[in-house]
Amino acid sequence: MKIYYVTLNTPEEARKIGRELLEKKLAVCVNWFPITCVYSWKGEITEEPEIVLIIKTQDGYRSQVEQVIVQNISYTNFMAEISPTNVNQGFLDWLNAEVPL
């Protein structure tokens, strides 16, 4: 199992990306929520709202997941791959039933 932590600009982007990942069977579940981000960009410190998208999927789908994200945004964003070590069996059963290995 893999989890991807992705930053986006709007809830609409998260919704569109999340639904496309589910329709293509590249994820079993996605979550998104608003955060505030402070970062340095081109010598300036900037603070603005951001959306975090969490994608739950199988191992081996990174390139397909990243392709869906890139097709739906036009800026530099953050995407991190997380490998959980302990996941409850009920969730893994659902994941395995919905997203091919």
Image (cartoon, helix red, strand yellow):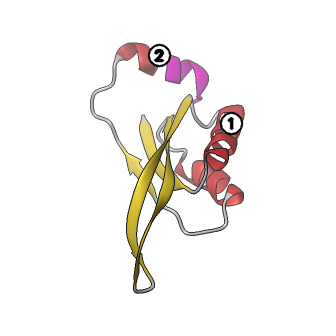
Q: Which residue is mark 1?
A: 19
Q: Is residue 10 left or right of residue 5?
A: right
Q: Amino acid at mark 1?
A: Arg
Asked if the residue at tag 1 contacts the one at tag 2, i.e. Cβ–Cβ closer than 8 Å, the answer is no
Measured Cα–Cα span from mark 2 to mark 1 = 21 Å
Looking at the rendered structure, the secondary structure element under dot 2 is helix
Q: Which residue is mark 2?
A: 93
* Relative vertical location of residue 45 with respect to residue 97 in this rendering, above or below: below
* Relative vertical location of residue 72 with respect to residue 100 in this rendering, above or below: below
- Residue 81 shows in the view: yes
Residue located at (47% from left, 16% from top): 93
- From the image, which quarter does the C terminus lie in? top right
Q: Position of residue 94 (x, y in %)?
A: 51, 17
| Circle 2 Cα neighbour tier, 10 Å, few/some/many (<14 / 14–19 / ≥20) | few
Q: Position of residue 24 (x, y in %)?
A: 70, 36
* Relative vertical location of residue 56 with respect to residue 69 in this rendering, above or below: above
Residue located at (60% from left, 22% from top): 98
For this rendering, which residue is in front, 76 or 65? 76
Give the mark toward the camera: 2 or 1. 1
Residue located at (59% from left, 28% from top): 99
- From the image, which quarter does the N terminus lie in? top left
Q: Which residues are magenta?
A: 93-101
Q: Amino acid at mark 2?
A: Asp
Residue located at (55% from left, 69% from top): 76
- Residue 101 shows in the view: no
Looking at the image, tell me whether mark 2 or mark 1 is earlier in sequence order.
1
* Relative vertical location of residue 64 with respect to residue 15 in this rendering, above or below: below
